């Protein structure tokens, strides 16, 4: 029997939390009753600097069910990935494995049984993978698939249709703790860890209440972050583009020389103006991409703390470990 923690980042989730708590309590009690997990297992909500009553709700449930629901409150909104990372790092020594999932219960909690089963079979990482996306809007589905394609093209290996619903053993979490980068894109880092891993398929439901905290703007930011923190392919592509442009410019040189010799020098205004704009634009783009990486280096060398825990509702049950 294993001690399993569920870590759930929450940002302004007051509408959905009561429902989530109800379902998770049922699930956890069942798992305890049938001997799948120990009585020390628990659910840890990480409040990612919510502006609504999320933390008050977490506190309330911790008071009612102190043995089951815990909370960590971050000092400010750090974003989904940082909140999740904070929860994983704070809890990794307390249990045998952590399952991370979203607060809105879009991930099927019944997949947890199979995840634990696979963990018992010796897998250190178990990825929850969506078997279908019927419940997502067409737009969300389209953008999500474009996202995976783009990531692949840019040299970032992801587990297809896997978000952050996964089980990681204490061993895998220890490995994760040794990635010191400031830019955290967990689903890109976790596959790099290695160890024996497998997938569990589940149907993704609809968000139970509240609204998505990932509008298009955040998704684009997320993709950019993922690409620039895990891959140098964009810089290589720019180098390739530079080489191609240089070759083109040689042709243009030849062309203008011929025009000169044949006495057509005033001609070609259009092409001149066009080249100024095209080359200027491309140069700016290239500088922008390189600047993005320099910004990353800047932040990495600062090695800033990733989060601060403001409050903690947790009774350690394995102080010695
Ligand atoms: N979340 C967070 N901090 C943020 C944004 C989101 O902790 O700044 C949490 C949110 O509460 C939820 C999870 O991250 O538990 C995923 O967010 P959401 O369900 O809105 O994303 P979607 O499922 O629409 O991609
Ligand atoms: Mg969601």
Image (tube, rainbow, N blue to C red):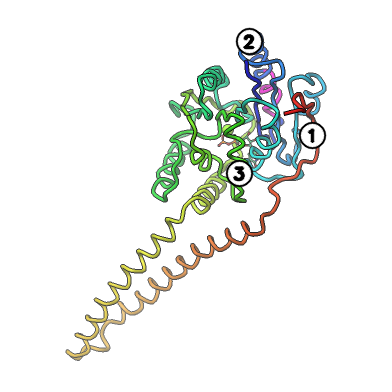
Task: Report the residue at 22% width, 89% height from top.
Answer: 260
| Mark in front: 2 vs 3 | 3
Q: Nearer the viewer, residue 69 or 199?
A: 199
Q: Residues within 10 Å of mark 3 (few under 14, many from 20)?
A: few
Q: Give the class, few, some or many, for how many residues have Cα within 10 Å of label 1's Cα (few <14, many ≥20).
A: few
Identify the residue under disc 3.
Answer: 178
Would the CB of label 2 be found within 8 Å of ligand 1? no
Residue for badge 1 = 312
x and y, in percent, of residue 114 in the image:
52, 18
Q: For residue 35, which numbered disc appears in the image?
A: 2
Q: Position of residue 271 (x, y in %)?
A: 30, 77
Residue range in magenta is 15-22
Magenta-colored stretch includes residue 18: yes
Closer to us: mark 3 or mark 1? 3
Residue farthest toward the top in the current orientation of the protein: 34
Question: Magenta residues: mostly which secondary structure?
Answer: helix
Disc 3 secondary structure class: loop
Q: Which numbered disc flags the more N-terminal residue, 2 or 3? A: 2
Quadrant for the N terminus in the image: top right
- Under circle 2, the secondary element is loop
**Tag nearer the camera, 1 or 2:** 2
């Amino acid at each position: 029997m294993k001690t399993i923690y569920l870590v759930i980042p929450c940002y302004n989730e007051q509408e959905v939390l009561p429902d989530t708590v109800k379902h998770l309590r049922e699930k956890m009690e069942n798992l305890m009753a049938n001997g799948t997990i120990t009585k020390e297992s628990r659910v840890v909500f990480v409040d990612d600097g919510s502006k609504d009553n999320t933390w008050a709700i977490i506190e309330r449930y911790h008071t009612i069910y102190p043995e089951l629901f815990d909370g960590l409150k971050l000092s400010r909104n750090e974003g989904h990935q940082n909140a999740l990372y904070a929860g994983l790092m704070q809890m990794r020594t307390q249990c045998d494995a952590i399952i991370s999932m979203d607060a809105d219960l879009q991930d099927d909690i019944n997949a947890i049984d199979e995840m634990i089963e696979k963990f018992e079979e010796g897998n250190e990482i178990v990825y929850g993978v969506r078997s279908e996306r019927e419940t997502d809007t067409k737009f969300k589905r389209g953008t999500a698939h474009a996202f995976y394609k783009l990531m692949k093209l840019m040299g970032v290996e992801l587990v297809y249709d896997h978000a952050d619903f996964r089980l990681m053993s204490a061993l895998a979490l220890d490995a994760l703790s040794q990635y010191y980068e400031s830019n955290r894109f967990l689903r890109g880092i976790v596959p790099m860890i290695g160890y024996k891993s497998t997938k569990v398929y589940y149907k993704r439901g609809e968000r139970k209440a509240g609204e998505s905290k990932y509008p298009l703007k955040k998704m684009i930011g997320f993709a950019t972050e993922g690409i620039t923190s895990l891959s140098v392919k964009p810089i290589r592509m720019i180098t390739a583009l530079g080489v191609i442009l240089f070759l083109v410019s040689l042709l243009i040189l030849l062309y203008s020389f011929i025009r000169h010799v044949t006495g057509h020098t005033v001609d070609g205004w259009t092409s001149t103006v066009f080249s100024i704009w095209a080359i200027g634009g491309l140069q700016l783009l290239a500088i922008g991409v390189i600047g993005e990486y320099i910004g990353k280096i800047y932040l990495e060398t600062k090695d800033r703390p990733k989060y601060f825990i403001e409050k903690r509702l947790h009774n350690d049950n394995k102080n010695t470990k």
